[in-house]
Image (cartoon, rainbow, N blue to C red):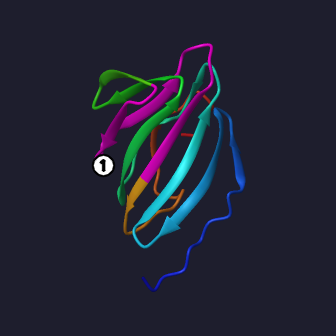
Amino acid sequence: MDFEKKYTNELVTRPWGFYRNVDQGEGYLIKILHVNPDGKLSVQSHNHRSEHWFVIKGSAKVILHEKEIILNTGESLDIPLKAVHSLQNPYEQDLEVIEVQRGDILSEDDIVRYSDIYGRV
């Protein structure tokens, strides 16, 4: 393939924890998300990407289309394009998730926030 890898493995902090971009190529981006206990990502959607979440440590509470789903270590879930969703860690153990983004535009600017406990709406 003739495209340049553009990732730094840099730690990016957020109010809910942090993430690292670990690999990127044409049409995909792979991140490791670390969600602290009681951490919640905003209720959001994306206009240009879908996501696949695979839990590698802990348990996740996922809101997808107003439905609550619990994912444990080793379980995964697809987040379709434009789906309203949220990732939460209401547990005492840290949560780690591999996130695979697929799409033509893979940018932090592609977040439509509907609600956020950290006031980022």
Which residue is at a point 48% across and 82% down the rendered structure image?
A: 3
Which quadrant of the figure contains the N terminus? bottom left
Q: Which residues are magenta?
A: 73-100
Q: Position of residue 12 (x, y in %)?
A: 69, 49
**Residue 76 magenta-highlighted:** yes
Which quadrant of the figure contains the C terminus? top right
Amino acid type, label 1: Lys
Question: Which residue ends up furthest to the top in the rendered image?
Answer: 92
- Residue linked to disc 1: 82
Q: Position of residue 118 (x, y in %)?
A: 63, 31
Compared with residue 103, is residue 31 higher up or lower down, i.e. above or below? Answer: above
**Which quadrant would residue 21 be assigned to in this image?**
bottom right
Question: Judging from the image, what secondary structure is the residue with disc 1 in?
Answer: loop
Q: Is residue 82 left or right of residue 10?
A: left
**Which quadrant would residue 23 be assigned to in this image?**
bottom right
Q: Position of residue 112 (x, y in %)?
A: 44, 48
Compared with residue 67, is residue 53 higher up or lower down, i.e. above or below? Answer: below
Which residue is at a point 54% across and 56% down the rendered structure image?
A: 108
Which residue is at a point 51% across and 37% down the rendered structure image?
A: 97
